[in-house]
Amino acid sequence: MLSLRQRAALASAGAVTTMAAVIVVMTADASAAGTRYEAETSPAVCTGTIDSNWSGFSGSGFCNGTNAVGAYAQFTVTAAAAGTATVDVRYANGATASRPADVLVNGVTRVAAVAFDPTGGWSTWVTKTVTVPVNAGSNTIRLSPTTSNGLPNVDYLDLGPGASPSASATPPGRPPQCTGSAPITCHFDVNPGNYTVTAWIGDQASAGNTSMSVEARRRILSAVTTAAGTITQYVFTVNVRQPEGQPTGQGGTGTPGLDVTFAGSSPRLSGLTVQPASSPLVVYLAGDSTVCDQPTAPYTGWGQILPTHVSAGAVVANYADSGESSGSFLSNSALFPTMKPLIKPNDLVFIQFGHNDKTTTASTFRSNLTSMINQVREKRGVPVLMTPPVRRLFSGSQLTDTALHVNSVGVNLPAEIRSLGSSLGVPVIDLTAKSEALVESLGPTASAALYLQQSVDGVTDNTHFSEYGAGRMADLVVQGIRERNLSLVGYLR
Ligand code: GCU
Ligand code: CA
C-alpha cells in the first residue's frame, strides 16, 4: 500500500523518534552524571504538599500536587549551555488513569500533555523522559497537569546534558507527505488502525495560528497561537478507518490512509511523525447523523469535535452513520458487525439512537439496545447509553414532545433508555436532558445558532448541528463522561 517514497519518508520519520529514544538511553546514563533536583528542595515549588508516606522516594519527600488542573511542580535548573536538554521525571501514579501534564520551560509550553501513566502503586516509581529546549544558565521547568486528577506524585527531576541537535527531539521538519501552506495538508499511506501522531506546531522564524484536523473534518486541536521561535510538540492518538467519515460512505469514502490538515489563520508546522499506537483506550461511537464524522460542511456531528477533548493514549473511533436507527445500526454489515470484532477489554462504546427510531416500538427499541449492550459485554467492552440530543422545536418557551424524542407511536425513547440503563447496570449520559436545558435556556431565537440555519448554512435544520452546536454538544458529552466517571476521564484534556 505504501509507495517506496512514502515508506522511506515514514521510515525516516520513525528514525527521528527512534533516535530520540536512543538519546534517552544515552542521556539517562549521562544524567546520572547530570544534575538531580528534588521536588522538596527550594527553589522547587509544589502546589500541594511535600509528603513522605509512600516509600521508595529519593531525598526527604515528594510533591503530592493538589488534584486540580494547573496545580504544578516546578523546578529551577541550571543548564551548562543553550540547546536541547533531556529531562527525566521520577514519579509514581497509583491511580488507574494516566495523569497528563504540560511541560513548560520558562513559562512556555514545550511538550503538551505528557502522559504520566499509572505505575501500579504509589510506591512504584518510574522515570518519564522528555526533551526540551533550554537557555544557558537558569531555567524553570514546570509540570502543569491538564486534567482535574492533577499530577502524579513527583519525586525528582534529572537534567541531562544537552543532546546534540541532530539527534534530539528538535523538530524534525516538515515531512514530504505535507504540501501547501494555508492549509497545510499531509497524507500518510497507512492501513486502518490507531496511530500516534506527533506534531510540532509553530515556527522558528515566524508567528502562527494553527489548528489541526484529520480525516473527514475530525477536529483534533482548535487553533493555537504561537510566537516566532515557539514550537510546541503535541502528541495525539488518531483512528484511521476506510471509508473515512461515515462507515456506509455517505458524503464520500475519502482517501485510504491518514489525512492531516493544519489550518488556522497562519498555519505553522515544524514536524509531523506517524507511528502505530499500542493498545490505546478506544471510545467507539455508535449513533446517527448527529454523532458521525460528517465529510461535508456545514453538517457536523458532535463525535467529530469530541477528539479535541481527548489526550494521547485514548482515541475516538466514530462508527456513527447518517439515518441509522437502533435496528439498522445492528444489522448493517458496515456498522455494528464491523465495529464489534475491534472492541477490546475495557474499551468504551457509546450508544446513541432515537432520531431515526420514529416508528420503533418500545419493546423493539429495548431489544435492539440490549443486543448491542450484550455484544459489547461479550467482548468485555464497557457500554454507555446516551439519550439523543433534542431537536429545536418549540411550543412557546418549551420544547415539544417531538423535540424530546417521543416518537410517532408514542414511545418516550429517552425514558426507555434511562430505564434500560438502570435495569442493565449500564451508565447513561442523559444528553436529551442536558441539551434540553441548554436549548431552552437559550430560547427559541438564540438556540438557532446551535443548528443549521438557512441564513448561514443555506439549509434550515432543527435537527443537525452547526460546527458551533456540535462543539456545545461535545462539551455536554464531556460533562456526562465526568459525571459518570468513565475511564476516559483520565485522558480528558
Ligand atoms: C492518594 C495518595 C497520594 C496521591 C493521591 C492522588 O491520596 O496517598 O499520595 O497524591 O492519592 O490521587 O493524587
Ligand atoms: Ca495528589
Image (spheres, rainbow, N blue to C red):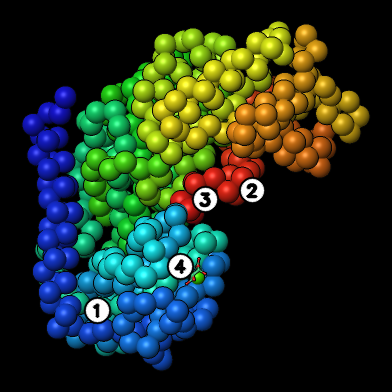
Distance between the alpha carbons at the discs numbered 3 and 4: 14 Å
Distance between the alpha carbons at the discs numbered 4 and 1: 19 Å
Could you tell whether 15 is left or right of 137 in the image?
left
User: Mark 3: which secondary structure?
Assistant: helix
Tell whether circle 4 marks a residue whose Cβ is less than 8 angstroms from ligand 2. Answer: yes
Q: Considering only order in the chain, which callout, 4 or 3, is on the residue closer to the N terminus?
A: 4
Query: Which residue was labeled with disc 1?
Result: 159
Q: Considering only order in the chain, which callout, 4 or 2, is on the residue closer to the N terminus?
A: 4
Could you tell whether 468 is left or right of 374 in the image?
right
Residue 489, label in figure = 3
User: Mark 4: which secondary structure?
Assistant: loop
Distance between the alpha carbons at the discs numbered 1 and 3: 31 Å
Q: Amino acid at mark 4?
A: Leu
Residue 151, label in figure = 4
Asked whether residue 457 appears in the rendered view, the answer is: no
Q: Amino acid at mark 2?
A: Glu
Instruction: Report x, y in % for residue 47.
Output: 51, 78
Residue plotted at (58% across, 20% down): 370
Residue plotted at (32% across, 58% down): 233
